[in-house]
Image (cartoon, rainbow, N blue to C red):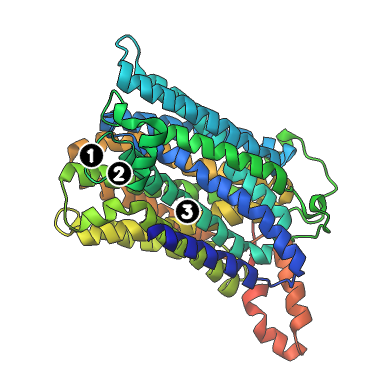
């Protein structure tokens, strides 16, 4: 039933994509663009299984909170650093090559994690620090994962006009949310089905018995399958990507067009890797976007990463049981809603400005974190709903900032670099919370939400500072459209105020 609902939700998202066509593209362009972004997006979503399967394997591998925090923190830090390195690389080689490097590299690394898990449980080597080895290979996996998000945004920048990028931000949020669902629910489903003698056998368990003879396993749980199966799925998507993805419309036999982002008027220029890095790191707006994403990354990852350990260690079996068993699905639905909410509000009500709905989302994060702190130990339903609400609004922020604002202000020429830097801040935040939370919760779980409230507040204040910012090329485009649509000089003075008073973002 859940899978059917997921498929229906995905179908609705695709329908909304074809409905949202403000520039009146031709039907074949819309279809070819769909053929381009759908396999690209699904590849990115399936990368999340190979990223979050470490959470599903925590209990079967008997990881302590400190070990788990060290492994996830090392991977997140590697991911953050790699994004800064690989963003400029993808700007030079293109998103098509970038996504294939990501899925094939991550697939191989995940297979290696599966082998390490097998050795960890079956052979139990005494002379090897298995946790350290696991952290190293997981970090290699995250290095290849880092090519994924910058590649999808790089390809997007040539196919979506700034007035359509709110819609793509919603699509990007949908893909992230689908990935979270796959990573949590499918990952946990694989682990459950891989048990030798589960309390409630499923069809997937019978498949594993037939294919892998899990009942003959030397351990109660063939947990390594949660790594081998995603590895195989990623290889399949990599092959599909090879035949379907094109970097630009012209590569697909269509006509390229001006997207009116920060690269407008500069497409003839060639930038070196140093030029790309300087273009982003010396831009104060990009650094503000990165800081918003850092604070959001701390909150988002701390909540979704530690909710299940909280429920397990507090032995909550009431309403928390529902949220625990369906966390991935609930985060997917809330994340899809958050992505579409942010994208629609940005394009519809704020003339493609990304900061206003971001500030609203950050403010609501403070509300939900406060509710968690008040009801943490006595009202499981409120805590579960707060976790879902935080999933909604953190995806809103990521879809608007990394998925959209980064490419708006970075421009097509530097999109991957810009997205890499902003996404790096997300996982720098994830690394900070991963290394911190294991020690913080030793003093009591109440410090979990209390630790996060200042980060949400800081993100909101920076977004408020950016409230009126637009790239210069976008501002000129909106001004031009406004003038074309003005029926008379008298009416223009009143109807255009929401656009003409928008600030140009500071540049270097």
| Most distant residue in the top direction | 127
Q: Do the residues labelled 1 and 3 touch (CB within 8 Å)?
A: no
Crowding around mark 1 (Cα neighbors within 10 Å: few <14, some 14 to 19, many 20+) is some
Q: Do the residues labelled 2 and 1 touch (CB within 8 Å)?
A: yes
Marks 2 and 1, how far apart at CA: 10 Å
Query: In the displayed structure, does residue 305 sit left or right of residue 258?
Result: left
**From where the camera sits, is residue 391 visible?**
no
Front residue of 342/59: it is 59
Front residue of 127/10: it is 10
Q: Quadrant of residue 499?
A: bottom right
Which of pointers 1 and 3 lies earlier in the amino acid sequence? 3
Secondary structure type for disc 2: helix
Which of pointers 3 and 2 lies earlier in the amino acid sequence? 3
Which of discs 3 and 2 lies nearer the camera? The answer is: 3
| Most distant residue in the right direction | 268
**Residue 306 image label:** 2
Marks 3 and 2, how far apart at CA: 19 Å
Crowding around mark 3 (Cα neighbors within 10 Å: few <14, some 14 to 19, many 20+) is many
Marks 1 and 3, how far apart at CA: 29 Å
Percent across and percent down for residue 54 are: 38, 35
The N terminus appears in which quarter of the rendering?
A: bottom left
Percent across and percent down for residue 42 are: 56, 50
- Judging by the rendered image, the residue that carries numbered circle 3 is 178
Q: In which quarter of the image is residue 365?
A: bottom left
Front residue of 458/142: it is 142
Front residue of 398/18: it is 18
Which of pointers 2 and 1 lies earlier in the amino acid sequence? 2
Give the residue at x 46% y 54%. Answer: 177
- Judging by the rendered image, the residue that carries numbered circle 1 is 441
């Amino acid at each position: 039933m859940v899978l059917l609902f997921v498929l229906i939700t995905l179908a609705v998202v695709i329908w909304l994509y074809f409905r949202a066509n403000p520039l009146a593209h031709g039907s074949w362009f819309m279809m070819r663009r769909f053929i381009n972004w759908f396999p690209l997006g699904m590849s990115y979503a399936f990368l999340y299984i190979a990223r979050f399967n470490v959470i599903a394997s925590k209990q079967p591998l008997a990881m302590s909170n400190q070990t788990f925090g060290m492994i996830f923190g090392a991977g997140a830090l590697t991911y953050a650093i790699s994004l800064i390195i690989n963003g400029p690389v993808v700007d030079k080689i293109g998103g098509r090559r970038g996504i294939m490097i990501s899925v094939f590299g991550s697939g191989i690394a995940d297979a290696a994690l599966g082998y390490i898990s097998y050795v960890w449980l079956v052979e139990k080597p005494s002379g090897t620090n298995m946790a350290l080895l696991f952290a190293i290979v997981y970090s290699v996996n995250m290095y290849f994962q880092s090519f994924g998000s910058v590649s999808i945004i790089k390809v997007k920048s040539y196919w979506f006009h700034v007035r359509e990028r709110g819609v793509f931000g919603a699509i990007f949020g949908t893909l992230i949310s689908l990935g979270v669902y796959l990573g949590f629910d499918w990952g946990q489903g694989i682990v459950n089905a891989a048990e030798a003698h589960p309390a409630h056998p499923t069809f997937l368990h019978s498949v594993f018995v037939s294919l892998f003879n899990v009942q003959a396993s030397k351990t109660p749980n063939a947990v390594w399958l949660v790594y081998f199966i995603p590895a195989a799925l990623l290889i399949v998507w990599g092959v599909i990507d090879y035949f379907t993805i094109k970097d630009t419309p012209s590569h697909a036999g269509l006509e390229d067009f001006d997207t009116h982002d920060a690269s407008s008027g500069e497409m003839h220029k060639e930038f070196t890797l140093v030029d790309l890095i300087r273009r982003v790191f010396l831009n104060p707006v990009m650094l503000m976007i990165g800081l918003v994403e850092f604070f959001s990354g701390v909150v988002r990852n701390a909540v979704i990463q530690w909710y299940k350990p909280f429920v397990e260690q507090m032995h909550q079996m009431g309403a928390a049981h529902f949220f625990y068993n369906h966390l991935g699905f609930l985060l997917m639905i809330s994340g899809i809603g958050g992505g579409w909410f942010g994208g629609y509000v940005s394009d519809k009500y704020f003339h493609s400005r990304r900061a206003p709905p971001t500030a609203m989302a950050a403010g609501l994060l403070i509300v939900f974190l406060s509710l968690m702190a008040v009801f943490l130990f006595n009202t499981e339903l409120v805590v579960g709903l707060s976790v879902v609400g935080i999933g909604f609004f953190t995806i809103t922020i990521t879809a608007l900032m990394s998925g959209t604002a980064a490419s708006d202000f970075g421009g097509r020429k530097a999109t991957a670099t810009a997205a890499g830097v902003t996404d790096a801040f997300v996982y720098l935040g994830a690394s900070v919370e991963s290394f911190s939370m294991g020690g913080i919760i030793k003093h009591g779980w109440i410090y979990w939400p209390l630790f996060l409230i200042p980060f949400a507040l800081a993100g909101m204040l920076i977004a408020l500072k950016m409230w009126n910012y637009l790239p210069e090329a976008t501002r000129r485009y909106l001004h031009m459209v406004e003038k074309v649509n003005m029926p008379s000089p008298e009416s223009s003075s009143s109807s255009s105020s929401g656009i003409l008073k928008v600030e140009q973002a500071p540049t270097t």
